[in-house]
Amino acid sequence: MKKILLVTRPIAPPWDEGSKNFAYYLAKNLVGFEINLMTKGILPELPENVVSNDIYTTSKVSDFNFSQKLRALLFQFKTKGQFDINHYFFTPTKLNSYLIKNFLKSKHTKTIQTIASLRDDLWSDCDIKKLMFADLIITYSDHAKNKLDSLGFQNVRRVYPGIDLEKYQLQEKNPELMREKNISQDDFVINFSGEYVRLGAIDLVVDSFIEISKKIPTAKLTLAVRIKNEKDAQKKEKVMEKIKKNNLREKVSFFDNGKYDMPEVYNLCDISLFPVQNMRGKFDIPLAVIEAMACEKPIILTDLEILKELGNNNNSVIIEKDNLQQLTDAIFDLYQNKEKRILLGKNARKFCEENFDIKKIAEIYEDIYKTL
């Protein structure tokens, strides 16, 4: 049985980070291999072929500092050559790529890099060539694969990330959560799962909700937005000030402590928004989009090139980026047309079943591990 090491940040709760969530669900669905996870503590309820390696002392994104990175490096150094495949699930940097290439790689171990996004805003073509080190490079999007192909790489394959479609599916709204957030069955709930500072969407979302509230008295807004650093905390304060200034505090709910079950959050809403201006620092295939689609929620996306692999007129609503009027009009149109919401939601679910089912994605990785 081949031994695989998934090199990641801490695989442990809270489940609020895309790369570790994907690695965790992938590991649980892989068969025929010994899968080793880098964790904080020993995870319960894992399949017999999945091994927890207790490496980290924290699993909070904000606490992933130099000492945690050093723990990860030391574990890789101590276990050098012990695994058949090292599969890397993190954004490469000049430093970690250099260390892996020169100190951590073993001739006895094959390597895979899963690249969630190519940071064109940070990396030149020359940088990208230096950052890639693996025997096989896997991208989340055709957009990234085409970029690497154009740079002369011949070992690139596109494999979409997967999600658990049994977990992320259409469900009844949770009555307890509705009471907690003061949401009734008659409310029209709009959800945004994104970020405060990055992506350039939060102000557009809030400004649009201010306008929508004038047209739809029953409109409510849920913000499933993590606070990852001080800048995010400061931005949330400004968002709160704007909401209170417009007397909308009772209509806005926050899900930002990492303790909520995201399928319940998605299923609390009638529609979901992802009107980002850019995707810098985000997965090419943002899980917040496909998770909402899997829950049969109609989603409004911006017309970014990178999002065209996800959105089309059959499964979503596409608007121009940074266009407040278009976003507001699209929300109001969906409010008025329940049949359209249902149709878009069902098409979105089918799209996820065809492309992002973790069971199908796991089978692809099993074939990769067998043949590498």
Image (cartoon, rainbow, N blue to C red):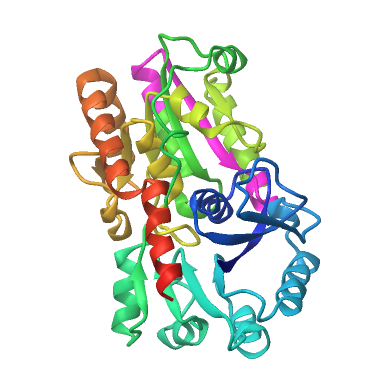
Taking the image as shown, residue 358 lies to the left or right of residue 92, namely left
Query: Quadrant location of the N terminus?
Result: bottom right
Q: Position of residue 290 (x, y in %)?
A: 38, 43
Q: Residue furthest left?
A: 313
The answer to whether residue 267 is seen in the rendering is: yes
Up-down: is 182 above or below 86?
above
Q: Position of residue 255 (x, y in %)?
A: 59, 32
Q: Quadrant of residue 346?
A: top left
246 lies above or below 23:
above
Q: Is residue 89 left or right of residue 148?
A: right
The location of residue 13, given as percent across then percent down, is: 68, 44
In the picture, the quarter occupied by the C terminus is bottom left
Q: Which residues are magenta?
A: 210-233
x 67%, y 36%: residue: 257
Who is closer to the viewer here, 150 or 368?
368
For the point 63% across and 48% down, the residue is 232
